[in-house]
Amino acid sequence: MKTLSVLLLSLLVIACNTKPKEETTPEIPKQQEFAIIIHGGAGTILKKNMTDSLERAYKAALTEAIQTGYKILQDGGSSLEAVQRTINVMENSPLFNSAKGAVFTHEGKNELDASIMDGATLNAGAIAGVTTVKNPINLAYEVMVNSDHVLLSGQGAETFAKEQGVELVDPSYFFTQNRYDALQRILEREKQDSVSASSAFIDPFIKDEKFGTVGCVALDKNGNLAAGTSTGGMTNKKYNRIGDSPIIGSGTYANNATCGVSSTGWGEYFIRGQVAYDISAQMEYAGKSLTEATHNVIQEKLTKMGGTGGIVALDHYGNPSMEFNTEGMYRAYMNDQGELILGIYGENED
């Protein structure tokens, strides 16, 4: 009995001295007043293959593009305007596989795709397979705001472009010698190796020719996210192939409640994985941070499928993610303090 009394007294003392466990509230990230992030494509981008002058040219182009959008946001402009004008700078540069620098199809043409999405309304617009639109992202915007549709393609999209007064050019505007030469190398390789059209299409050598897709995500002072993507597709593509760039949820996605995402890489896998939307969904339904979601989608799920590429993204706080599973990705980010983060290669080379 004495032993039992001592035991009960001991338990009472322990109980009295044990403080209840305090509930911890997750740390809320600092809210950026505005922010912007861009990519110029992901793929086999190695420092040993890059001349100093070409590296400087890419860095200058990325800097010009992101500072264009940054100025718009700084002055109180909308994220949608910032995304368009930033992408316009890259579309007008022959360095990137978008508009002016677009790769060539098997038939020797340039077929352009683009999409844009408004995180405030979840409205979106996209175009695919156009050949005369100087800035495809601008036409995607017109589809979003001036049509009842989300995705227009080919001749119909170009007819709509004329009706909306979008600038059109002769297809010769998109010719660049290095992109044309890349197509010729691939066509010659097809002959030498006697490979089928389908195997040539998915050959790693050809994948390496597709690392110039451009994209942008912006957060404006009103807390609205927007995302956009523009591309010339994949070198040697056939049959009017369309990749992920104009597909909402694959190449582009924006939702004020979660994040904005722009993708770049092997489009067929990004479509199958609905990569851009998956990141947002993991944040919304699983409570993951942007970093956790992008790592899971790109480094685990996409990689397991056999897909290559990357994304740039902003959460609704303005925090960035630049996730890729390739050797490099042209990328840049600016926060509301004007700090610029610029990258080209992987972690071990930048």
Image (cartoon, helix red, strand yellow):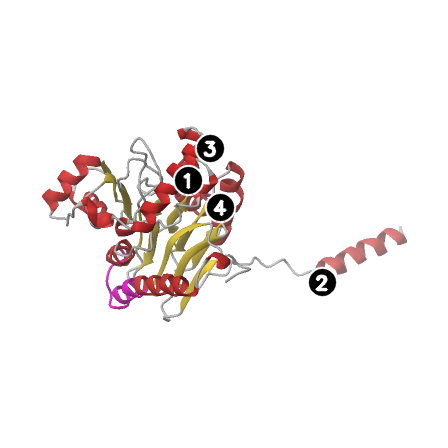
Residue at 13% x, 38% y: name it. Answer: 159
Cα–Cα span, label 3 and label 2 = 79 Å
Disc 3 residue type? Asp
Q: Amino acid at mark 4?
A: Ile
| Residue neighbourhood size for the residue with mark 1, other residues' Cα within 10 Å, grouped as few (<14), some (14–19), many (≥20) | many
Label drawn at residue 22: none
- Sequence-earlier tag: 4 or 3: 3
Residue 180 occupies which quadrant of the picture?
Answer: top left
The residue under the point 41% across, 53% down is 312
Q: Which numbered marker is on residue 270?
A: 1
Which segment did they paint magenta?
Answer: 67-80
Amino acid type, mark 2: Asn
Is residue 119 visible in the rendered image? The answer is no
Front of the two marks 1 and 3: 3
Q: Secondary structure at mark 1?
A: helix
Side of 334 where 1 appears, left or right? right
Residue behind mark 2: 17
- Residue 317 in picture, x, y percent from top left: 39, 59
Mark closer to the chain start, 1 or 4? 1
Answer with the quarter of the image where residue 37 lies.
bottom left
Disc 3 crowd rating (10 Å Cα; few below 14, some 14-19, many 20+) is: few
Residue indicated by mark 4: 298
Instruction: Specify which label sits upstream in the sequence, 1 or 2.
Output: 2
Is the C-beta separation of discs 1 and 2 under 8 Å?
Answer: no
**117 on left or right of 194:** left
